[in-house]
Amino acid sequence: MTDSQWFMFVGGLLLFMGLTASILKRSVVTSAIIYLAVGVLVGPTALNLFHFNPLKESALLEVLTEVAVLISLFSAGVKMPVPFTFARWRAPIMLATVSMTVTVATVAAFAYYVLNLPLGAGVLLGAIVAPTDPVLATDVQIRHPGDHDQLRFTITCEAGMNDGSAFPFVMLGMGMLGLHEIGDYGINWLLLDVLWATVSGITIGVVAGVALARLGWKLRSKPHKHELMDDFLGLGLIGVVYGLTTLVNGWGFLAVFFAAVALRQTELKLAEAARVAFDSSKTQQSARAAGKAQAELEPPETVSQGSLVFKEHLERLSEVMLVLLIGGSLYLNSWTWDAVWLALFLFVIARPVSVVVGLLGTNTTWRIRGMTGWFGVRGIGSLYYLMYAIENGLPEALSLQLIQMTLIVVTLSILLHGTSVKPLMGLFWRRGK
């Protein structure tokens, strides 16, 4: 396809999606399914007008998926609706740690015993397909900062954290393949890739998020009352936090998510403090003076809310681009039994079992556990980890195997989870939580 044809093609697709938005909301089909179908149609599977080679374009795809995941993680973080308490966050924390570990282990065992992959490759494959996706799972994630739905909160928060908690297992798999130094008995991996990278990432994210929230609040408040560019502040926070965290060998995905969470939660606390101060002033002042106090104590907006709409638009555009590329990467012979069985094993056995194990001892209802066990959407994060491994020396033959399996896992996730999300979520809400 020529450049002119590409502009017309993508522009026409965007026009179609924009004009049919209300129809799609009532349809069983999700937007990702439409993008995938269009990608398959113009790709080598059907018309062969376009072919994207993930192996040859691994550097480009790594950057594209990295940016998409970062934007989505920030969007997820600023929509967290409640102050951080261990009781409320316990379930997603367990899912992002215990369930992540169980998923990687079960997929690694399946890859080793059934698919005859080396154990290191099995661990790497498990780490690639284990994290749930913050980009493609929008239909089961928190829709706005005031959304207090427990199921949406659990799935969104898990997706925000497990894109970072999967990284240690990626490094473990690469270490077992001789591509990364994990030390004797894995001691370097445990100390550096697990403990240091996790703690440093969370710490940098929280400190940066709190600092920006307080600075933005101060600049908007009297006597400064500055106008701020929230879009730039949000993007700047992502860039600084991610760059600084990776510079010290921490997990940047975790840092960005927790920076967004800290930003939102700090602004909520500052707003609550302003409200309390205003309520106190009303008992001591006339109505006119109280109105003036309210204007002085309550800034018109916050960085987290002001930057969210722009990030959601970027998230949608990245979904269009990357799902089209997935469709344009598939051949008919990509659909091998090994890849299909892996996907079904992941969706039907590994994910549900890991959720049950991870949520043992929590007060999460079995209905929420069942929905969480099914809606472990795989997508852009998996592609990023795969491209990261390829760019860091994964052998070509093994790269081709893992590319094929990962593409089929993501494709089937888009189809199976995409067609079931609206009916199941509707049934879930009608019957109550």
Image (spheres, rainbow, N blue to C red):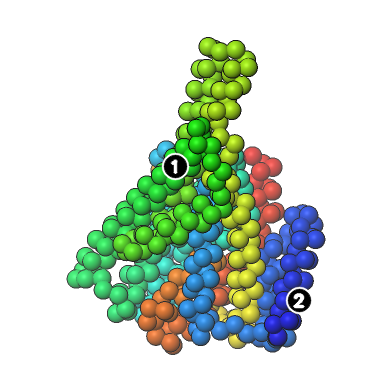
Q: Residue at x 49, y 72 (%)?
A: 63
Q: In terms of secondary structure, where does tag 2 sit?
A: helix
Q: Quadrant of the N terminus?
A: bottom right
Q: Which image quadrant is residue 25 in?
A: bottom right
- Pointer 1 local density, CA inside 10 Å: few below 14, some 14–19, many at least 20: few
220 shown above or below 333: above
Is residue 150 visible in the rendered image? The answer is: no
Closest to the observer, 100 or 41? 41
In the visual, does 37 lie left or right of 408? Answer: right
Residue 404 x, y percent position in the rendering: 53, 80
Q: Earlier in the sequence, mark 2 or mark 1?
A: 2
Q: Amino acid at mark 1?
A: Leu
Tell me, for residue 8, which label it has, or none: 2
114 shown above or below 214: below
Closest to the observer, 324 or 334? 324
Q: In terms of secondary structure, where does tag 1 sit?
A: helix
Tag count in the figure?
A: 2
Q: Amino acid at mark 2?
A: Met
In the visual, does 243 lie left or right of 143? Answer: left
- Pointer 2 local density, CA inside 10 Å: few below 14, some 14–19, many at least 20: few
Residue under numbered circle 1 = 215
Question: In the image as oriented, which residue stretches furthest toward the left?
Answer: 184
294 shown above or below 390: above
Residue 286 x, y percent position in the rendering: 60, 12
